[in-house]
Amino acid sequence: MSQSSDITHDVLVVGAGLAGTWAAMIASQAGVTDVAILSKLHPLRSHSGAAQGGIAAALNNVRPINPNEKRGDLEPIPPGDDPIDSWELHMKDTIKGSAWLGDQNAIKIMVQDAIDIVYTYEHMGCVFSRTPDGRINQRRFGGHSVPRANFAADWTGHVLLHTVYEQACKQGVKFYSEWYALDLIVEDNVCKGLVAIDITTGELHLMRAKAVMFGTGGYGRAWRITSNATANTGDGVALAYNAGVPLMDMEFVQFHPTGLYRHGILMSEACRGEGGYLVNNSGDRFMEDYAPDRMELAPRDIVSRSEQTEIDEGRGVEADGQGIHLDMRHLGHERILERLPQVREIALKFAGVDIIDHPAPIQPTAHYSMGGIPADVNGQVIRDADGTPVTGFYAAGECACISVHGANRLGTNSLLGASVFGRRAGYAIAEFIQGGAQLQPIQGNPLERNRQRIARFKSDPANGKTESWAAVARELKDTMTTNVGIFRNETRLRKALDDIKRLQEHFGQVRVMDKSARFNTDILGALETKHLLTFSEVIAASALARTESRGAHSRTDHDAPDNGNWLKHTLAHPNDDDGPTLSYKAVDIDWDNHPPEVRKY
Amino acid sequence: MTNVTIRVQRFNPDVDQKPHLDEFQIELTQGKTILDALHEIKEEQDGSVTFRRSCRHAICGSCAMNVNGVNMLVCDAPLKDFVDRRGRVTIRPLPYLPIIKDLVVDRTSFWEQYQRVKPWLLPPDDVPEKEFRMSPDEVKALQDAEHCIMCGACYSACQVVAMSKKYIGPHALLKAFLRVLDPRDSAPGERLTDLDQGDGVFRCHTIFNCIDACPKHLNPTQAIETLRKLVMKRQAFEAARAQRQQSLDQPISVE
């Protein structure tokens, strides 16, 4: 059912972080005149802005003073001296970081485009930190064999986000700020638009578009301790799944090694990139036992597991033994103030610790979702192992699984992936529109369906019993933390699935207290909680099926990678009856140049 | 256990004649922030209490509010630091802005002024193959302005804004400063001419409220002062910029 009151656009992007804003800006620059972005927050509140440490690209601006040192000081590479980095080396590091689950064709594109995208950001006005001779400064990061994290102090994501937003404004992209997408409309494998609520007025709108692009971000909010913003409730992945699109590799969720103790707030990996130590309750740098070569700069999955092992074996810090110390005192006052000002402020404000004088208490924190909506290297969403496209539907950034990060993402590759594939999606969308794409008639009555959904939350329950969405969300986070955390096994994962099923039933009784139309965040909380339940089931089911340990997916009952059986992507297809149906998709591997190896650091 | 009374200003313009305060009891525990208290109220006591928030570590700029009469971000504000002598904390929306609902304000004028200063860089026509070269000192001069999170705490604390929404405001002037001072920007002259209008830099009364309100310890007043000086010597500044842009692709000389 289509009406003249429907909102229509050539391109409708959902999510105003780096991926979505790049896509909109590029599509507009490429000549598509009617491009709009919808975001449940003001665009500048997007979580891309919380990224701290850097964006990876082999610019060859700095090198270690002592070439054999994995740590130690860096210096600008003098003009004429040999480069130390290349996209090939960046590719090699990313493949190894991904535990060979990343698609190598996609990784190659990302690391090749990296160099141009960082220079483009610079040309657009991004204020990067500089070497004395005026080049973009670089620091070390975990899993990268050379310093290639290009940074702006420790608020890199913030400056990238503001820069790309400014450019999108300049370009005349239309923004629907504080609008929330409720329902994605895919009929006969064609994406036709969505239903959204204007949060301020509470009004529902049918929004039709020739192409819809999701850059809706991640879903760390399904765990109790997370670095993620309250907005990161996986709305996009849940919407896609509800519309019949499968989700890929959802079992791979990254726990960042340095979330602030009890808060989970990110303490940038740049703390270790600049030379910070991780120590246990005896003051030992325990990474020596787990990754003797790279130490604290091993990839995140390995460092988080090492920390959790120290904690589980009684060597944690703080009263409950659930913390680890991040010690930066030896970096000195000046370097901390210049390079890590935000991190210092966070530790001061939330833990009362000045990192100049004291170690900061930290713990692993749910951080990044490697899995998501399956898409090809142009952001085109696909629906099966053969790569059949969902016409008119694109995705990039954390909500998508392209898959460049495989089983574990390297730090600084997320800002990179969101930017590179957001940009590529923008070009692909422009081509699709200019190739004659049309608005498609919508068969059902999605507007009415969603009005009823919302009315139900405000209605009186049949049996007088109500449940609060906050209580459901809390229970879900408890079970996800306990049972689908850093270490998993069959018993725990089955328990999680049982809990999630029970909570999904409880959700039927959820009612809200706020019955008003205007800016109803109570309704949003309910809708977001439903999304958490939807994708959490997919995560647990995918994790239960994968009887191996690879990257961030670590099974105590299957503690090694099993390349014979499991070097493949999981595709979880929605199935009304009983949870997802799983199928598998081959990984793109260059067997001559980058065959799987033992992953040691 | 100590309890704290949280007083939250409530207002839904669809049904209420005027704002009123609702009181909620919250347990004061170690490490609890004002935002934590608001979440607790919403999730356990009254789901209709409405506020904006997202990142919860002072980088997204969503949760600027007025606590006990002072504008701040509530996400990194420890609850215990704001309990008054009567055991109360009073939370109101940012002042001088229309209220959408409860603690959520309408920032339309704030964003219009942001757009007005053309926040984007206007680079020179010749773009180098690699990066424009900037010295660490040139970057340092921009660091404050670059760090602004556009939370609106300064804007809503400004007495000039309170009188007239036509005034560009401290946030947008800080953004203008970022562009004017950036050696890569080719239009500092045009920008300074615009800032010289009646609602521009000379409208600031130098009351310093913006500095007090800024949760990131930035200094919009000083940026406005600098812009005023540059307005006065606009032509010389433009000439110096044109000169500087001749060598944007050249290494900074290191002593």
Image: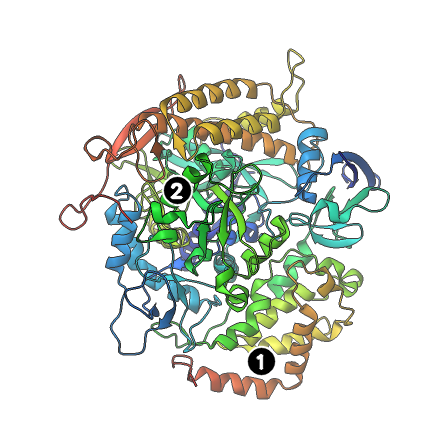
- Tell me which residue sits at (25%, 34%) in the image: A585
Q: Name the kind of residue labelled 2 in the image.
A: Ser
Q: Name the kind of residue labelled 1 in the image.
A: Gly
Q: Chain of mark 1?
A: B
Name the image quarter holding residue A374: top left
Residue denoted by label 1 = B189
- Tell me which residue sits at (74%, 54%) in the image: B71
A479 or A179: which is nearer to us? A479
Q: Secondary structure at mark 1?
A: helix
Tell me the quadrant of the picture where the N terminus of chain B can be found.
top right
- Tell me which residue sits at (36%, 44%) in the image: A302
Name the image quarter holding residue A399: top left
Q: Is residue A347 above or below residue A582?
A: below
- Tell me which residue sits at (42%, 80%) in the image: B248
Q: Chain of mark 2?
A: A
> Tell me, what colour scheme is on the image?
rainbow
Residue A67: horizontal and vertical position, in percent? 28, 67
Residue A396: horizontal and vertical position, in percent? 39, 46
- Viewed as shown, does residue A192 lie left or right of A353? left
Residue A343: horizontal and vertical position, in percent? 54, 56
Q: Is residue A244 above or below residue A111?
A: above
Q: Residue furthest right?
A: B86
Residue A569: horizontal and vertical position, in percent? 28, 35
- Viewed as shown, does residue B137 lie left or right of A237? right
A61 or A188: which is nearer to us? A61
Residue denoted by label 2 = A306
Name the image quarter holding residue B118: bottom right
Dot 1 crowding, Cα within 10 Å, few <14, some 14–19, many 20+:
many
- Viewed as shown, does residue A88 lie left or right of B59? left
Tell me the quadrant of the picture where the C terminus of chain B can be found.
bottom left
